[in-house]
Image: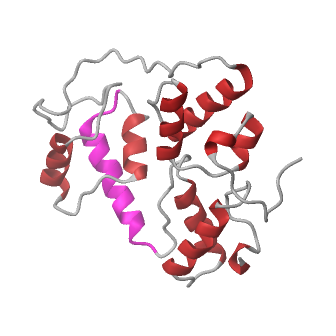
Amino acid sequence: MPPSASAPRPQLADIKTSQELNQWYWLKTELVAYAKQAGLPTTGTKPELQQRLAHWLDTGQILPPPRRLTTAKFDWSRAALTLDTVITDNYRNTRNVRTFMQRHVGSKFAFSNEFMAWMRSHEGKTLRDAIAFWQELHRRKTTADYREAALPQNQYAQFVRAISQAHPGISASEIRRIWYIKRSQPAPHSYQPGDENL
């Protein structure tokens, strides 16, 4: 039976099953520390770490980190970049890329979730295409209804987006206050109608 909303958040070391683990919100630093203590690999994203711990709790087996196979050897940190540079499967956001983009679109350039996701999912396109995408994205950001996409693993950003849309004008400090309560409770950790009354 799932814990009640008033149940205190347990210590991670006291969690015995994946069901218990997934009922609560954990910081990545907590998951890394627990994985290290349990002798599990600590690399990967927060969802990957949580999945690895869940598998270990239920089976006692160590789920290896997913292999990210890349074939390109292109050096995104040092290579000379041009408009015709092709985006490879080993693309990285580097200072070199930032400098190139700023040279072509101006000092206003900054990496964003949407731009980074586009780069990683458009292998074979060129930096000319990346500039066109960034310029379109920048244009959309000037519209009143624009909201930046949150990464799937960033639960806080998704919560902020949802509660802000449901309650325009809610202050950042009030959102943080509600989130701290929300994350100390059992799942779900996404915005639910009524969270504004916590």
Whole-percent x, y for residue 41 in the image: 48, 24
Write the residue at 69% across / 56% down.
9
Specify the principal SS of the magenta part.
Answer: helix
* Residue 116 position (above or below residue 123): below
Q: Quadrant of residue 22?
A: top right
In the rendered image, which quarter contains the C terminus?
bottom right
Q: Image check: 59 left or right of 40?
A: right
Camera-nearest residue between 14 and 75: 14
Q: Image check: 44 left or right of 16?
A: left
Within the magenta stretch, is there residue 129?
Answer: yes
* Residue 128 position (above or below residue 192): above
Whole-percent x, y for residue 61 in the image: 64, 17
Write the residue at 43% across / 43% down.
117
Whole-percent x, y for residue 157 in the image: 52, 60
Write the residue at 62% across / 44% down.
12
Write the residue at 70% across / 40% down.
15
Outermost residue, right side: 1
Whole-percent x, y for residue 107 in the image: 16, 61
Which residues, given as a range, are shown in magenta?
124-143
Within the magenta stretch, is there residue 89?
Answer: no
Camera-nearest residue between 8 and 181: 8
Q: Image check: 55 left or right of 71?
A: right
* Residue 72 position (above or below residue 48): above
